């Protein structure tokens, strides 16, 4: 494919982010200077934007704002496919204990986040992580983010090959700036005035990188465990005679939106053709450069690839891909997704090795009285050479386990209060929440801290209504950006203000259908009464084993459809 850098389409004045990238294309900012200055309490507003390309967000503890801003940093790892060795996991665990808030947060993109890092610990944390041959490069920023892959260990040759492809794409789409190594490994500020640094142009991303973030996921039908259609690129594995022959490619998905701005909306990706494994890198680069060249650089709320496809059309996009690749993609192959969700408990892979799926409430690995998950996982990683796999639903899978070690690992977990069977209700296992308050600067309402208690109330409600075993996918976010993918849930709560949420209903089990707004504002005290009314109607008119999300789409959507639809 051609690597020609085309000028981005500019409709009016570019955003401040675009000016920053143009001025300092190495993405170095003055990060190393500030990092090494003990008198600097935080990074400048401009440098906050550069930090994101290095996998770091500058935040403050919003619980203490009345006293004064206490700056802290969130650091996100780049972990393609969410796969870590035992030594890799132990390094994350150690750094979280030494430089973070003693916890590890599994992200909805199969990575780890450190929370509560203070400035004096930021440099040591980043340096030690990189010296352990792991990094945070491009975990945030206007570049390709962490590439997702099915988390369940190989139940066929297919899954292992898909993971290899995901890792290959992650490596191929990394930005090439030398600033990352200079700042976080060497601790040296790049000379921003040198000709080489002033004229640096990334060979793929160009001088100003992408208009905004870019996301890629792989999935193996019939399980859509990566919420594939919510990504800029989704690769759907296609097999023949048990062999991976290529992928259907979907493009233009994304969930972020803004309250009160109808020009922003969730969108599912369109399936646009079929690619062979040999074409993966070139096709990925071609789609990424369409975003680079046609994405909106004047309005960051409108700067995702999904808006390019929605406004220019799928046919235009396919023609643009053909022009960049020098060949057209053939039509997609048949496929079907039937479900989404993680495996829990013990199972066996095709190689005879065991694996264990563990539920992690709201993705937070920590120790609490009687439930010492962080200590238990540290013990397992120390004693056994297992593989850690982080899931898109914020859980963890322990893999590549010798069957002879299964009883011992179960015993370690039991000793620390972690059950292997009956880990949580079906309802709770299908739930997700974003971190939200007190660390996220965008959060309008609680999410991670509120959802567990709300789930307890919903579980009690379901038991009272004889629905105790019902699985309903419930997701909550503290703002409309959709990090926990609430717009795909059967019940989605989206924070609008403290104690107030939008209520979305009607996603499906396969996570192939967007839900719809049912109520614009529900106070936290109104949630259970509202759900009681809905569930009563569900019981009365449910068809067979119909899921709640499907009932919502069949009954509630028809009630609110415009006349004539």
Image (spheres, rainbow, N blue to C red):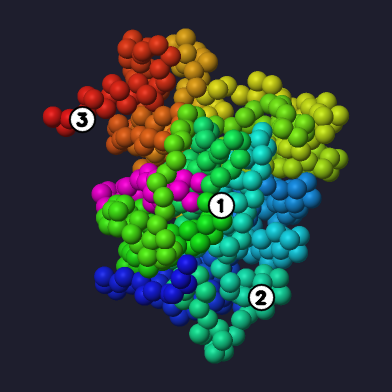
Does residue 539 lie above or below 17 as drawn? above
In the rendered image, residue 285, in percent from the top left (x then y), is placed at 49, 62
Task: Name the residue located 26 percent from the left edge and 70 percent from the top edge.
Answer: 11
Disc on the earlier residue, 1 or 3 = 1
Identify the residue at horizontal 76%, vertical 38% (top origin): 400
The percent position of residue 27, horizontal first and vertical second, equals 53, 73
Question: Viewed as shown, does residue 357 lie left or right of 503?
Answer: right
Q: Residue at x 46, y 76 (%)?
A: 207
> Is 259 a magenta residue?
yes
Residue 182: mark: 2
Element marked by disc 1: helix
What is the residue that sits farthest to the left in this orientation? Answer: 564
State which quarter of the image contains the C terminus.
top left
- Residue 117 versus residue 378: which sits nearer the camera? 378
First of labels 3, 2 by sequence position: 2
Q: Mark 3 highlights which residue?
A: 561
| Residue 287: quarter of image | bottom left
Structural distance between the alpha carbons of marks 1 and 3: 42 Å
Name the element at disc 2.
helix
Q: Which mark is residue 277?
A: 1
Q: Residues within 10 Å of mark 3 (few under 14, many from 20)?
A: few
Is 357 covered by the magenta stretch? no
Tell me the CA gap for discs 2 and 1: 34 Å
Residue 288 lies in what quarter of the image? bottom left
| Magenta-highlighted residues | 247-275
Q: CA distance from mark 3 to mark 2?
A: 57 Å
Q: Nearer the viewer, mark 2 or mark 1?
A: 1
Rendering coords of residue 241 (x, y %) = 59, 35
The answer to the question of whether label 2 and label 1 lie on touching residues, with beta carbons closer than 8 A, is no
Q: Can see residue 227? A: yes
Q: Is residue 497 visible?
A: no
Element type at mark 3: loop
């Amino acid at each position: 494919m051609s690597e020609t850098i085309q000028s981005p389409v500019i409709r009016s004045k570019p955003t401040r982010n675009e000016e920053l990238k143009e001025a300092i294309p190495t993405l170095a900012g003055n990060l190393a200077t500030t990092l090494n200055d003990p008198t600097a309490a935080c990074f400048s507003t401009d440098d906050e934007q550069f930090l994101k390309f290095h996998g770091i967000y500058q935040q403050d503890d919003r619980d203490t704002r009345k006293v004064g801003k206490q700056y802290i940093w969130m650091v996100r790892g780049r972990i393609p496919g969410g796969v870590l060795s035992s030594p890799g996991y132990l390094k994350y665990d150690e750094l979280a204990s030494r430089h973070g808030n003693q916890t590890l947060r599994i992200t909805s993109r199969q990575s780890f986040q450190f929370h509560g890092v203070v400035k004096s610990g930021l440099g040591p944390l980043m340096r030690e992580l990189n010296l352990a041959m792991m990094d945070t490069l491009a975990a945030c920023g206007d570049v390709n983010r962490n590439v997702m892959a099915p988390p369940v260990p190989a139940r066929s040759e297919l899954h292992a090959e898909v993971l290899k492809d995901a890792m290959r794409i992650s490596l191929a789409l990394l930005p090439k700036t030398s600033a990352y190594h200079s700042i976080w490994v060497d601790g040296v500020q790049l000379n921003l005035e040198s000709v080489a640094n002033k004229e640096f142009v990334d060979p793929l991303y160009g001088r100003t990188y992408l208009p905004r973030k870019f996301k890629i996921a792989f999935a193996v039908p019939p399980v859509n465990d990566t919420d594939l259609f919510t990504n800029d690129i989704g690769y759907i594995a296609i097999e023949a005679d048990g062999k991976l022959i290529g992928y259907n490619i979907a493009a233009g998905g994304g969930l972020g939106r803004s309250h009160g701005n109808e020009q922003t909306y969730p969108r599912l990706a369109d399936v646009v053709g079929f690619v062979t494994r040999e074409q993966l890198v070139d096709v990925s680069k071609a789609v990424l450069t369409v975003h680079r060249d046609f994405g909106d650089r004047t309005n960051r709320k409108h700067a995702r690839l999904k808006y390019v496809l929605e406004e220019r059309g799928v046919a235009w996009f396919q023609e643009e891909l053909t022009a960049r690749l020098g060949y057209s993609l053939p039509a997609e192959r048949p496929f079907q997704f039937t479900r989404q969700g993680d495996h829990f408990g013990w199972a066996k892979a095709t190689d005879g090795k065991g694996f264990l799926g563990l539920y992690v409430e709201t993705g937070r690995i920590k120790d609490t009285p009687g439930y010492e998950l962080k200590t238990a996982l540290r013990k397992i990683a120390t004693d056994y050479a297992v593989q850690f796999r982080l899931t898109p639903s914020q859980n963890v899978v322990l893999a590549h386990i010798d069957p002879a070690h299964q009883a011992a690992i179960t015993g370690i977990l039991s000793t620390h209060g972690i059950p292997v069977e009956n880990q949580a209700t079906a309802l709770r296992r299908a739930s997700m929440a974003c971190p939200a308050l007190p660390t996220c600067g965008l959060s309008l309402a609680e999410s991670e801290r509120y959802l567990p208690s709300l789930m307890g109330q919903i579980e009690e409600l379901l038991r009272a209504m004889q629905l105790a075993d019902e699985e309903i996918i419930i997701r909550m976010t503290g703002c409309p950006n959709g990090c926990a993918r609430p717009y795909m849930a059967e019940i989605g709560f989206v924070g609008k203000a403290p104690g107030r949420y939008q209520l979305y209903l009607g996603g499906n089990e396969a996570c192939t259908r967007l839900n719809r707004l049912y109520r614009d504002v529900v106070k936290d005290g109104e949630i259970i009464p509202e759900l009681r009314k809905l569930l009563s109607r569900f019981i009365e008119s449910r068809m067979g084993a119909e899921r709640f999300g499907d009932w919502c789409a069949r009954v509630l959507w028809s009630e609110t459809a415009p006349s004539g639809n």
